[in-house]
């Protein structure tokens, strides 16, 4: 089947076929991590729709919206190679008419951890994801575990708004040296790479410890060793569903998440671990 590129909502409606539809929402600049999301969608659905839309609502004025990489032609090549059926690539004006009023609130959960570092980010992200769900009407949607708080908030929105969509999380894809793949990695210079690797190293070191206090202390020590080239935003050990910090007696799955700035590039990463298993 030939890839259909739908540049607006009318073309998207025309491209719809019978059968199970999977949506992979992206902001483009596709890399192997996105391709693994697409492959997961491909296994489950008759029609795979990839949206490519750099969403202005989830960037604050001091963030990198205009600098965000846009690589549409190579994104289409990647979609063709992965057997995607439809690429939905709307213009900003098509998604957000000027008389728009209502947006999604990510609540308290959207204002902690990553949300505290990026005020308004999760409201903008949930607003576009809800719009994409309404426009594409998928049966399932696939998101990367690398954005663990985003994934948790999307699951929360689906539950709170009774959306009939199955949400799948897909494991983080890493470079051989441990760096989590991200569209922003292309901004890292050779010199930036050394401090950038401290993120995954800190998560691995932390995850090898047993108690929350040891985990936090060990991971933070590795981040501190990276020196002034790494400016840590936060290190958090949280409940994967709520993103609330876990207590020393917490039992079950937890997420150890980190965000840091290397030069002008902001990186995030996380690992999932089990605390106090019975
Ligand atoms: O993860 C992303 O690339 C974006 O936050 C998403 C989910 C496509 C919404 O703009």
Image (tube, grey):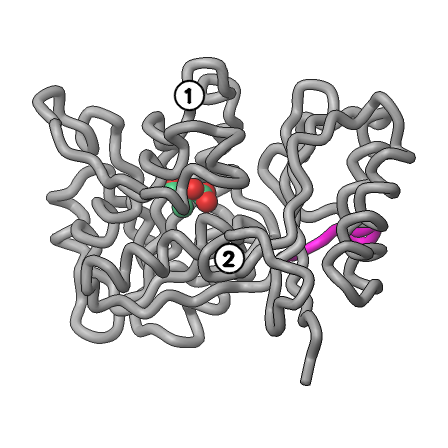
Q: Which residue is mark 1?
A: 60
Q: State the separation of the CA atoms marked 1 and 2.
A: 34 Å
Residue at 48 percent of width and 42 percent of height: 75
In the image: residue 94, left or right of residue 1: left
- Frontmost residue, 110 versus 29: 110
- Frontmost residue, 265 versus 190: 265
For residue 79, above or below residue 208: above
Judged from this view, the residue extending furthest toward the left is 99
Corner quadrant of residue 102:
top left
Q: Quadrant of ligand 1?
A: top left
Is residue 173 magenta-colored?
yes
Q: Position of residue 45 (x, y in %)?
A: 34, 73
For residue 103, above or below residue 67: below
Residue 2 visible at all: no
- Residue 271 bears which disc, if any? none
Residue numbers of the magenta segment: 172-178
Label 1 element class: loop
Q: Position of residue 208 (x, y in %)?
A: 83, 64
- Residue 81 bears which disc, if any? 2
Residue at 62 percent of width and 67 percent of height: 250
């Amino acid at each position: 089947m030939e890839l259909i590129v739908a540049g607006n909502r009318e073309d998207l409606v025309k491209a719809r076929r019978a059968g199970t539809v999977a949506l992979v929402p992206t902001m483009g600049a596709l890399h192997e991590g996105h391709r693994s999301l697409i492959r997961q969608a491909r296994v489950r659905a008759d029609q795979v729709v990839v949206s490519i839309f750099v969403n202005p609502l989830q960037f604050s004025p001091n963030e990198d919206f205009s600098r965000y990489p846009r690589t549409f032609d190579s994104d289409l090549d990647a979609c063709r190679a992965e057997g995607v059926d439809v690429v939905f690539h709307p213009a900003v004006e098509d998604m957000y008419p000027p008389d728009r009023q209502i947006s999604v609130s990510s609540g308290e959960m959207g204002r902690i951890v990553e949300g505290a570092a990026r005020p308004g980010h999760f409201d903008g992200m949930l607003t576009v994801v809800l719009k994409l769900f309404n426009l594409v009407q998928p049966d399932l949607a696939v998101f990367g575990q690398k954005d663990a708080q985003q994934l948790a908030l999307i699951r929360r929105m689906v539950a709170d708004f009774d959306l009939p969509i199955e949400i799948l999380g897909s494991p983080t894809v890493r470079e051989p040296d441990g760096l989590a793949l991200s569209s922003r990695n292309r901004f890292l210079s050779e010199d930036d790479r050394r401090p950038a690797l401290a993120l995954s190293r800190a998560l691995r070191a932390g995850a090898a410890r047993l108690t929350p206090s040891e985990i936090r202390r060990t991971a933070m020590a590795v981040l501190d060793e990276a020196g002034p080239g790494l400016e840590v935003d936060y290190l958090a050990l949280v409940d994967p569903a709520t993103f609330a910090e876990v207590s020393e007696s917490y039992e079950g799955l937890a997420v150890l998440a980190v965000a840091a700035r290397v030069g002008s590039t902001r990186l995030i990463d996380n690992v999932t671990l089990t605390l106090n298993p019975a």
